[in-house]
Image (cartoon, grey):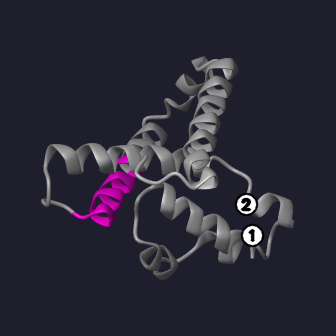
Amino acid sequence: MVSIRHSSASCFIAYVEQRLCFALPKPHAVFQFFATSKDVAIGPAAVMSQTVGLIITYINERYPNRWLGPEIATTLAFICGFIVLGIGLLRIGWIIEFIPATAVSGYMTGSALNIASGQVPGLMGISGIK
Protein backbone atom coordinates (compact mmCIF):
# COMPACT_ATOMS: atom_id res chain seq x y z
CA MET A 1 0.00 0.00 0.00
CA VAL A 2 2.85 2.37 0.74
CA SER A 3 4.16 1.90 -2.80
CA ILE A 4 0.83 2.83 -4.39
CA ARG A 5 0.53 6.05 -2.39
CA HIS A 6 4.21 6.79 -2.99
CA SER A 7 3.85 6.31 -6.76
CA SER A 8 0.75 8.47 -6.82
CA ALA A 9 2.51 11.25 -4.93
CA SER A 10 5.54 11.03 -7.22
CA CYS A 11 3.30 11.42 -10.26
CA PHE A 12 1.63 14.41 -8.63
CA ILE A 13 5.00 16.04 -7.92
CA ALA A 14 6.17 15.44 -11.49
CA TYR A 15 2.91 16.81 -12.98
CA VAL A 16 2.25 13.52 -14.78
CA GLU A 17 -1.29 12.21 -15.00
CA GLN A 18 -1.78 9.63 -12.26
CA ARG A 19 -3.63 7.09 -14.38
CA LEU A 20 -0.54 6.88 -16.60
CA CYS A 21 1.67 6.09 -13.61
CA PHE A 22 -0.46 3.12 -12.64
CA ALA A 23 -0.38 1.82 -16.22
CA LEU A 24 3.40 1.62 -16.24
CA PRO A 25 5.18 -1.51 -14.99
CA LYS A 26 6.37 -0.94 -11.44
CA PRO A 27 9.73 -2.02 -10.08
CA HIS A 28 7.97 -2.01 -6.70
CA ALA A 29 5.88 -4.98 -7.81
CA VAL A 30 8.99 -7.12 -8.18
CA PHE A 31 11.04 -5.47 -5.43
CA GLN A 32 8.43 -6.11 -2.73
CA PHE A 33 9.11 -9.83 -2.94
CA PHE A 34 12.84 -9.39 -2.31
CA ALA A 35 13.01 -6.63 0.31
CA THR A 36 11.46 -5.60 3.58
CA SER A 37 8.69 -3.01 3.67
CA LYS A 38 11.01 -0.29 4.95
CA ASP A 39 13.15 -0.64 1.81
CA VAL A 40 10.30 -0.49 -0.69
CA ALA A 41 9.35 3.19 -0.41
CA ILE A 42 12.66 4.70 0.73
CA GLY A 43 14.76 6.37 -1.93
CA PRO A 44 15.34 9.49 -3.99
CA ALA A 45 12.05 9.19 -5.89
CA ALA A 46 10.58 12.42 -4.50
CA VAL A 47 13.64 14.43 -5.50
CA MET A 48 13.70 12.85 -8.96
CA SER A 49 9.98 13.52 -9.34
CA GLN A 50 10.49 17.13 -8.38
CA THR A 51 13.33 17.52 -10.87
CA VAL A 52 11.31 15.88 -13.66
CA GLY A 53 8.37 18.14 -12.77
CA LEU A 54 10.57 21.22 -13.03
CA ILE A 55 11.88 20.08 -16.42
CA ILE A 56 8.35 19.39 -17.67
CA THR A 57 7.21 22.82 -16.47
CA TYR A 58 10.19 24.54 -18.10
CA ILE A 59 9.66 22.81 -21.46
CA ASN A 60 5.91 23.45 -21.41
CA GLU A 61 6.50 27.16 -20.70
CA ARG A 62 9.14 27.44 -23.41
CA TYR A 63 7.28 25.34 -26.03
CA PRO A 64 3.56 25.43 -25.11
CA ASN A 65 1.30 22.62 -26.39
CA ARG A 66 4.14 20.92 -28.25
CA TRP A 67 4.69 17.85 -26.02
CA LEU A 68 2.72 16.18 -23.27
CA GLY A 69 4.17 15.66 -19.78
CA PRO A 70 4.54 11.86 -20.12
CA GLU A 71 6.39 12.28 -23.44
CA ILE A 72 8.87 14.67 -21.81
CA ALA A 73 9.32 12.37 -18.80
CA THR A 74 9.88 9.33 -21.03
CA THR A 75 12.41 11.18 -23.18
CA LEU A 76 14.21 12.36 -20.06
CA ALA A 77 14.33 8.79 -18.74
CA PHE A 78 15.89 7.59 -21.99
CA ILE A 79 18.47 10.40 -21.95
CA CYS A 80 19.42 9.59 -18.35
CA GLY A 81 19.60 5.89 -19.20
CA PHE A 82 21.94 6.53 -22.11
CA ILE A 83 24.16 8.70 -19.91
CA VAL A 84 24.37 5.97 -17.26
CA LEU A 85 24.98 3.35 -19.96
CA GLY A 86 27.80 5.47 -21.40
CA ILE A 87 29.38 5.92 -17.98
CA GLY A 88 29.20 2.16 -17.44
CA LEU A 89 30.59 1.22 -20.85
CA LEU A 90 33.44 3.72 -20.57
CA ARG A 91 34.13 2.51 -17.00
CA ILE A 92 34.24 6.06 -15.61
CA GLY A 93 31.89 5.56 -12.68
CA TRP A 94 34.72 6.51 -10.33
CA ILE A 95 34.02 10.16 -11.19
CA ILE A 96 30.94 9.98 -8.94
CA GLU A 97 33.25 9.55 -5.93
CA PHE A 98 34.30 13.20 -6.36
CA ILE A 99 30.80 14.47 -5.52
CA PRO A 100 30.97 15.19 -1.78
CA ALA A 101 28.37 13.64 0.49
CA THR A 102 27.60 17.05 1.98
CA ALA A 103 26.61 18.39 -1.44
CA VAL A 104 24.26 15.45 -2.03
CA SER A 105 22.85 15.79 1.49
CA GLY A 106 22.32 19.53 1.04
CA TYR A 107 20.54 18.98 -2.27
CA MET A 108 18.27 16.33 -0.77
CA THR A 109 17.50 18.53 2.27
CA GLY A 110 16.76 21.54 0.08
CA SER A 111 14.46 19.46 -2.11
CA ALA A 112 12.67 18.09 0.96
CA LEU A 113 12.12 21.60 2.29
CA ASN A 114 10.90 22.73 -1.13
CA ILE A 115 8.42 19.85 -1.33
CA ALA A 116 7.25 20.40 2.25
CA SER A 117 6.79 24.15 1.77
CA GLY A 118 4.83 23.46 -1.41
CA GLN A 119 2.33 21.47 0.65
CA VAL A 120 1.64 24.30 3.11
CA PRO A 121 -0.90 26.19 0.93
CA GLY A 122 -2.96 23.03 0.51
CA LEU A 123 -2.86 22.32 4.23
CA MET A 124 -3.97 25.85 5.01
CA GLY A 125 -6.71 25.83 2.35
CA ILE A 126 -5.09 28.58 0.27
CA SER A 127 -5.82 28.23 -3.45
CA GLY A 128 -4.10 29.82 -6.42
CA ILE A 129 -0.51 29.29 -5.24
CA LYS A 130 1.61 26.92 -7.28
Residue type at numbered disc 2: Ala
Say left or right for 1 vs 130. right
Q: Residue 34: which quarter of the image?
A: bottom right
Residue 104, position in %: x, y?
63, 27
Q: Residue at x 75, y 63 (%)?
A: 40
Whether 3 is among the magenta residues is no
Q: Residue 47, which numbered label?
A: none
| Mark 1 or 2: the one toward you | 1
Question: SS for tag 2?
Answer: loop
The part of the chain drawn in magenta is 68-81
Q: CA distance from mark 1 to mark 2?
A: 7 Å
Q: Between 121 and 115, which is closer to the camera in this rendering?
A: 121
Please tell me whether the stretch drawn in magenta is mainly helix, strand or loop. Answer: helix
| Residue at which label 1 appears | 2
Residue 7, position in %: x, y?
59, 67
In this rendering, the count of numbered labels is: 2
| Residue at which label 2 appears | 41
Q: Between 46 and 123, which is closer to the camera in this rendering?
A: 123
Q: Are marks 1 and 2 in contact (CB under 8 Å)?
A: yes
Residue 42, position in %: x, y?
74, 53
Residue type at numbered disc 1: Val
Relative to 128, say whether 116 is above or below.
above
